[in-house]
Image (cartoon, grey):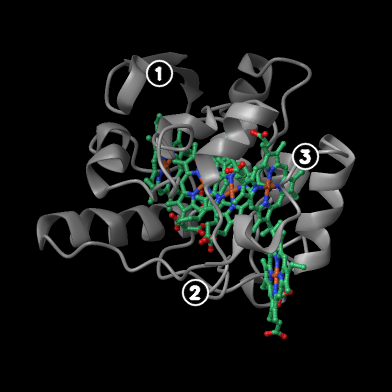
Amino acid sequence: MRTLAIVLGGVGAGGVAAVLAFTGPSPQAQQAAAPSDSLTAPVISDTGSLEGPRQPIFFRHDIHAGQFKIQCQYCHYSVNVSPEPGIPAMQTCMGCHLIVAGSDTGGKAEIQKLRQAWNEKKPVEWVRVHFLPRHAHFPHQRHIKALGTQSCTKCHGDVQAMPQVYQVATLRMGWCVQCHVQNKPNSVSRDCTVCHY
Ligand code: HEC
Ligand code: HEC
Ligand code: HEC
Ligand code: HEC
Ligand code: HEC
């Protein structure tokens, strides 16, 4: 049995390190190596029935954040310092995918698309899933500071189980105000000018 361990650090800000240890190539060997609580992402042959917009490369959160437990901030590195959490640059992907080629035919083909984009220096154009109208102001980092780095599920649902990201919350004004009132009943965070200017 061949064992490959990749230890990465410092690609994202803050030196978040991802440690991956996996065995290949037999599926039985992979299962034996996986901790018992880990989610083993299923093989998906029919992507047409998945919720959420179809992305140019079938990037799976259930594999990366679920099965391999890569921290959200490893890729969305500016989540607690910037109004925009940031979608990772190809360089972040290639830190692993220069080596990791994939195990099944579908996965290999998708990783090949990524490698080709990297070689041709054409950044992947991800389709945005969440967006607010311009008149509404949402400082993402204030929310992470107040609610914690594990709070993603409160607004985005269980992303680590999603093969393709989709919008879970309504993102309507009532949704925002309801949480503000619950968190700080007496604060100014329901004044119109907090969110609109
Ligand atoms: C290995 C890198 C990586 C990891 C780890 C990762 N993401 Fe992502 N994330 C991406 C990429 C690439 C996209 C854009 C493509 C897509 O939407 O699938 C994305 C998109 C998203 C989006 C949709 C953004 C939009 O367009 O509105 C959300 C929400 C999100 N990620 C949340 C999370 C959460 C929560 C975690 C941890 C549980 C996480 N991500 C872990 C790479 C990653
Ligand atoms: C920390 C390491 C790491 C990073 C960073 C990473 N990946 Fe992966 N990725 C993996 C591993 C491990 C697998 C599973 C490979 C396997 O099944 O043999 C994988 C699988 C994949 C697959 C195949 C999925 C399938 O259907 O089997 C694609 C496509 C992919 N990654 C794209 C990306 C993209 C795009 C990024 C950057 C946004 C990225 N990866 C970042 C480790 C990483
Ligand atoms: C209080 C609710 C809330 C929490 C908590 C939250 N988000 Fe978001 N997130 C949003 C909203 C709303 C948007 C859309 C913002 C916009 O369009 O301006 C968004 C957008 C995003 C985007 C896409 C933005 C871009 O730059 O393209 C990513 C990625 C993301 N969130 C990741 C995360 C991660 C990772 C966490 C946990 C560390 C998290 N979010 C926690 C509400 C939240
Ligand atoms: C899950 C709960 C939750 C949701 C949903 C939520 N917020 Fe917040 N929001 C908070 C918390 C907690 C704070 C921090 C309050 C503080 O720092 O005093 C905050 C702070 C803010 C601030 C900064 C307030 C200031 O004093 O500067 C703005 C602006 C804001 N939110 C806008 C929004 C918008 C727009 C939405 C909907 C798209 C939204 N929020 C959804 C919990 C939430
Ligand atoms: C916590 C953040 C927040 C506060 C406080 C807030 N809004 Fe909003 N508002 C939003 C968001 C997000 C949207 C966009 C989503 C939607 O239309 O529901 C919005 C949309 C709107 C719209 C456009 C609706 C449409 O159909 O296009 C109006 C008008 C509006 N708000 C007025 C107000 C007024 C007046 C107040 C004060 C009484 C207020 N808002 C307070 C977040 C907020």
Q: Is residue 164 among what the camera can see?
A: no
Q: Amino acid at mark 1?
A: Val
Residue 63 at what x, y percent from top left? 58, 41
Q: Secondary structure at mark 1?
A: loop
User: Is 189 located above or below residue 55 in the figure?
Assistant: above
The type of residue carrying mark 2 is Arg
Identify which amino acid the numbered label 3 is placed on: Ser
Mark 2 vs mark 3: in front = 3
Question: Which mark is on residue 16?
Answer: 1
Q: How many C-alpha atoms fall within 10 Å of the one at disc 3: few (<14), some, or many (≥20)? A: few
Q: Which mark is residue 187?
A: 3
Q: Which callout, 2 or 1, points to the residue nearer the camera?
A: 2
Identify the secondary structure beneath mark 2: loop
Residue 96 to residue 19: above or below: below
Which residue occupies 40% across, 66% down?
Answer: 126
Which of 1 and 31 lies nearest the eye of the viewer?
A: 31
Measured in 3D between alpha carbons, the distance from the residue under mark 2 to the one under mark 1, in whole angstroms, is 32 Å
Disc 3 C-beta below 8 A from ligand 4: yes
| Disc number placed over residue 134 in the picture, else none | 2
State which tag comes first along the sequence, 2 or 1: 1
List x then y, in percent, for residue 111: 35, 53
**Residue 61 seen in the current view:** yes
Quarter assignment of residue 116: bottom left
Q: Mark 1 CB in 8 Å range of ligand 1? A: no
| Residue ranking furthest to the left | 120
Residue 166 in picture, x, y percent from top left: 67, 63
